[in-house]
Amino acid sequence: MLSSLFINYLFVISVILIWFMLGYQLLLFLLGFYYSRLSAREKVRLATAELYLPRVSLIIPAHNEALVIKKTLQSILAMDYPSERLEVIVVNDGSADSTASIVKEIVQIDARVRLIDIPVELGGKGKSTALNMALRQARNEVIGVYDADNQPEPSSLKYLAEQLAYDPKLGAVIGKFRAINKSENLLLRCLNIESLSFQWIVQAGRWMLMKYCTLPGTNFLVRKSIVEELNGWDEQALTEDAELTVRIYEAGYHVKFVPYAVTWEQEPRTVKSWVRQRTRWVRGNNYVLRKFALQLFQFKPRIIGFELLYSISLYYVFFLAILLSDILFLLCITDLIFIPVPGPYKQVWIVAIILFVMEIILALSREKGEDTPVNIFLTFLMYFTYCQLWLVVVVKGFYDDFILRRERKWAKTERFVVK
């Protein structure tokens, strides 16, 4: 009797949790939609302001990046930013290919580029280690990070730097990332929809709601003094961006999303590569969760602490939401699962899916050419396919960390030549 009652209450609470998440996401979407309008006006306003553009040291960690590093450096060096205020530091992290020789050729023709060359036997210790090595040698007041496969748009760096120049309270600013291979296959089309909806709903919405954003792994600037104050990047962290985000907010600074500062990057082309990358993300967040969970309740304002906790727990919250949604779906089409608590489960599930799809489609409308009939159809399809893959990833990340206790190792996304 008691166990049956407990299950009933647990199920009702779970349904409420799903609707809380949907409601919260809807709020973030509305705020993100509004922010897209504000940021467009802000872009025009800052363009006419006479701002001091800071000196920037861009860091590019590179481990076996011969296929992409030349194109990346060409894109970065062609950006619309004063040459005398820019240096580019490439950290060749023990590459076994021709990464170092390619960079050395560019060093010879452009004085803005510097190379830190780590021998093969000492390299491969991860992105955070490479970033810290470059930080110690960086000469400028602002640190920027780009992954070795990135092709930033010409004005991206200037847009980010203008924000730091305009608002001294900002600790860091982040741009938007796009998939350069977004139309290559079905997986990449889904991944493109996921990344755009995350940025326009979660990043933009949270900035409007509470001045909170999460650092991505690329296309961001942070004040060097802050990174030094925080003793650099945590070299144990697989998701060094999420870990540093927590410490930036803990120190009392903000991270702002600048959607018109865009970079294009390569995304995983196969399910196997995608699972490997996402598992690293889950395990990285496990580390951050263990490190900071208890401290987050001491944050002021407390809403920031709550959002940080929600953010680094998001994979497990999403896992629970998908699992419960699957149960509701089974309740709709079969009698295999019996829940004695009466309720309009079919209607609840249908409305939840409609909200899920509607939010994503409207988020896609913020990007030219993305709210197409194909993407609308794929958004429906993603619930039954792409979203279900996250169940596998979260379980795998948990199993690797807490059951097998596997060593945390950096898993680099496979690269390809961009023509």
Image (tube, grey):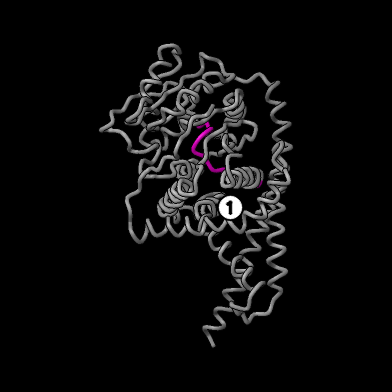
Residue 178, given in percent of the width and then of the height, sits at 59, 36
Residue 384 placement: quadrant: bottom right
Question: Which residue lies under the disc numbered 1?
Answer: 303
Identify the residue shown where x is 63% and y is 20%: 51
The total of numbered circles placed on residues is 1
Tell me if residue 165 can be seen: no
- Mark 1 residue element: helix
Q: Position of residue 55 (x, y in %)?
A: 51, 20
Residue farthest to the bottom? Answer: 1
Q: 368 left or right of 166?
A: right
Instruction: Kindly identify the residue that appears in the image at 61 percent across and 30 percent down.
Output: 261
Q: Nearer the viewer, residue 373 or 280?
A: 373
User: Which amino acid lies under the numbered mark 1 shown in the image of this protein?
Assistant: Ile
Location of residue 12 (image quadrant): bottom right
Direction from residue 77 to residue 125 in the image, left or right: left
Look at the image and give the residue range highlighted in magenta.
209-222
Q: Please name whichever residue, 239 or 276, is drawn nearer the observer in this view of the structure.
A: 276
Mark 1: few/some/many CA within 10 Å (<14, 14-19, 20+):
some
- Looking at the figure, which quarter contains the N terminus? bottom right
Residue 185 is situated, as x and y percent measured from the top left of the image, at: 58, 43
| Figure check: 143 above or below 333 | above
Q: Quadrant of residue 257?
A: top right
